[in-house]
Image (tube, rainbow, N blue to C red):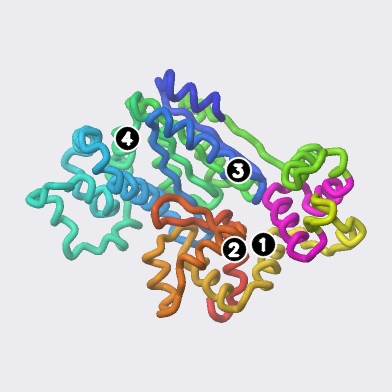
C-alpha cells in the first residue's frame, strides 16, 4: 500500500486503485490509516467515507466531501493564499455547474463564498431542500463530482479517497468511482476501497464495477487480509503485557484459538479478561499475571457483535442509553449533534466521550468530530436497542 502511495506522489501519471478485502475486524481500516501521516507530510489530502447497511448509500461520497471541506474551511485562516488557489482550481474545474454542486456539499459553498458576501452563489441554496437533492444525482452531477476530485488532486497536494464497506455501495457511487479512475486528466490520485469479501461474490455490483475499471486500462491492486498468525498474536500479547514472548506463548495460544486471530476480537478479548479479573497486574511480582485454566474454559462468542454487546451490557444503564443514541447518529458525529440528540440538562459530554474513548468505542477525528472505532462496535451498540423501538 505504501508503494502505491509513493508512486502516486512521485509519478502520478494516472489514478491508482487499491482494494482491501477481508472479514470484519481484520484491520482493513487500520491499515489504510497508516498512510495518513506520510500523506500529510507530503501536503496531501485525505477524504474518507463509510457505507452503512440500509443507510442512504447515495449520499456517502458527497457527505465525505462535505466533511473534508468542513475541515479545510476550519483551517483556511492558517493559509489564505493556498485556499484562494484551491478556490480558483475548483471554479475552473466545475465552472457554471458550481451552484448545483454547492447545493449538495454545503461546506464547499462556505469555502467558495468565503469573504464574498455579494457572491450570488452564496444565496443559491435559500429555500432549497438539500437533503432531497443529495439523493438525486444524475449524469451531470457525476461529471461535476469527477471534476471536483480532479481539482483537489495535483502534484503539490496528492489526494487519497478512501471509501469503506464497499459491499454496501450504490450504483451511482460505483459509477462515479469508475469515471474518476478512467479520467485521463486526473493525476496524483489514489483510491482505496475496503469491503468484506464474504459478502461480495462474482455477481455483486462491486465485482462488475472493478472488472470494468480494469478492462479500461486501470491497474486494480487487491490486498487480502485475514486472521493473524499465532506468532503475531504472541508478539501483540508480549508487547501489551511487557513480558518476554516466551512467557506469553501459553496465553497467546488460547487467545488465538478463541478469537480466530481476528485483530479486533483479540484486543477486545484481552480487555475483557482484565475486566473479569482473569488477567491482572500483580503488585507483589510487579508484572502481569493470568489464570490460564479459567481463561481456557471462558465461554466466548465467535461473533464480534455479540461479544461487544455483552461487554456493553456490563456498563451502567445511563451509559448504555447514550451509546444507543450514538449508534443511531451513524458512523460519524460531532458534539453539537450529540448534545441535541441526548437532551439532558446535566449531560457531561466531555466525561462521556473520554470514557468511550478509553473503552475503545470511539475514535477522535478532528476538533469536535468523532467516529465509531469500528462498524462492528456501532452495530453492537445498536443491538442494545429493543427491536420494537428501532
Element at label 2: helix
Q: Dot 2, how many residues are within 10 Å of its Cα: few (below 14), some (14-19), or many (20+)?
A: many
Element at label 3: helix
Is mark 4 in CB contact (under 8 Å) with mark 2?
Answer: no
Query: Residue 28 — which label?
Result: 3
Query: Residue 46 — which label?
Result: none
First along the sequence among labels 3 and 4: 3
Is mark 2 in CB contact (under 8 Å) with mark 1?
Answer: yes
Q: Give the range drawn in magenta.
A: 250-278
Q: Which residue is drawn at 65% across and 51% down?
A: 24
Query: Residue 152 — which label?
Result: 4
First along the sequence among labels 2 and 1: 1
Q: Dot 1, how many residues are within 10 Å of its Cα: few (below 14), some (14-19), or many (20+)?
A: many
Q: Dot 4, how many residues are within 10 Å of its Cα: few (below 14), some (14-19), or many (20+)?
A: many
Query: Which residue position is annotated with label 1?
Result: 305
Would you say residue 338 sits in the magenta stretch?
no
**Does 226 appear above or below 12?**
below
- How many angstroms separate mark 2 from mark 3 (CA)? 17 Å
First along the sequence among labels 4 and 1: 4
Element at label 4: helix
| Apparent side of residue 208 relative to residue 158 in the rendered image (left or right) | right
Q: Where is residue 379 in the image (x, y as percent from the top left)?
A: 59, 63
Query: Which residue position is annotated with label 2?
Result: 379
**Does 249 appear above or below 128?**
above
155, 94: nearer the viewer: 155
Amino acid at each position: 500500500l505504501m508503494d502505491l502511495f509513493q508512486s502516486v506522489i512521485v509519478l502520478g501519471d494516472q489514478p491508482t486503485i487499491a482494494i482491501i478485502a477481508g472479514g470484519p475486524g481484520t484491520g482493513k481500516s487500520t491499515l489504510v490509516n497508516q498512510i495518513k501521516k506520510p500523506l500529510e507530510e507530503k501536503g496531501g489530502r485525505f477524504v474518507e467515507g463509510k457505507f452503512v447497511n440500509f443507510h442512504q448509500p447515495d449520499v456517502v461520497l458527497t457527505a465525505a466531501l462535505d466533511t473534508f471541506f468542513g475541515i479545510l474551511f476550519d483551517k483556511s485562516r492558517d493559509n489564505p493564499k493556498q485556499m484562494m488557489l484551491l478556490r480558483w482550481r475548483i471554479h475552473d474545474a466545475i465552472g457554471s455547474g458550481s451552484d448545483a454542486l454547492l447545493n449538495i456539499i454545503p461546506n464547499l459553498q462556505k469555502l467558495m463564498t468565503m469573504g464574498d458576501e455579494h457572491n450570488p452563489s452564496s444565496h443559491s441554496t435559500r429555500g432549497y431542500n438539500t437533503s432531497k437533492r443529495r439523493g438525486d444525482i444524475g449524469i451531470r452531477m457525476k461529471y461535476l463530482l469527477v471534476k471536483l476530485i480532479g481539482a483537489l488532486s495535483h502534484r503539490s497536494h496528492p489526494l487519497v479517497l478512501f471509501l469503506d464497506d464497499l459491499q454496501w455501495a450504490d450504483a451511482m457511487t460505483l459509477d462515479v468511482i469508475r469515471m474518476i479512475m478512467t479520467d485521463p486528466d486526473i493525476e496524483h490520485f489514489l483510491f482505496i476501497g475496503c469491503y468484506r469479501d464474504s459478502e461480495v461474490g462474482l455477481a455483486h455490483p462491486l465485482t462488475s464495477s472493478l472488472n470494468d475499471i480494469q478492462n479500461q486500462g486501470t491497474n486494480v491492486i487487491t490486498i487480502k487480509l485475514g486472521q493473524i498468525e499465532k506468532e503475531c498474536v504472541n508478539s501483540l500479547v508480549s508487547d501489551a503485557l511487557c513480558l518476554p514472548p516466551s512467557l506469553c506463548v501459553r496465553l497467546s495460544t488460547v487467545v488465538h484459538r478463541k478469537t480466530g486471530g481476528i485483530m479486533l476480537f483479540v484486543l477486545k478479548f484481552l480487555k475483557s479478561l482484565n475486566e473479569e479479573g482473569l488477567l491482572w497486574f500483580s503488585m507483589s511480582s510487579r508484572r502481569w499475571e493470568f489464570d490460564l485454566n479459567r481463561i481456557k474454559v471462558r465461554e466466548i462468542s465467535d461473533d464480534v457483535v455479540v461479544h461487544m454487546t455483552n461487554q456493553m451490557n456490563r456498563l451502567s444503564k445511563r451509559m448504555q442509553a447514550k451509546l444507543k443514541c450514538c449508534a443511531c447518529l451513524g458512523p460519524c458525529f460531532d458534539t453539537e449533534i450529540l448534545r441535541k440528540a441526548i437532551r439532558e440538562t446535566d449531560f457531561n459530554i466531555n466525561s462521556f466521550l473520554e470514557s468511550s474513548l478509553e473503552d475503545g468505542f470511539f475514535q477522535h477525528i478532528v476538533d469536535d468530530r468523532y467516529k465509531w472505532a469500528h462498524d462492528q462496535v456501532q452495530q453492537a451498540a445498536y443491538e442494545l436497542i429493543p427491536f420494537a423501538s428501532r
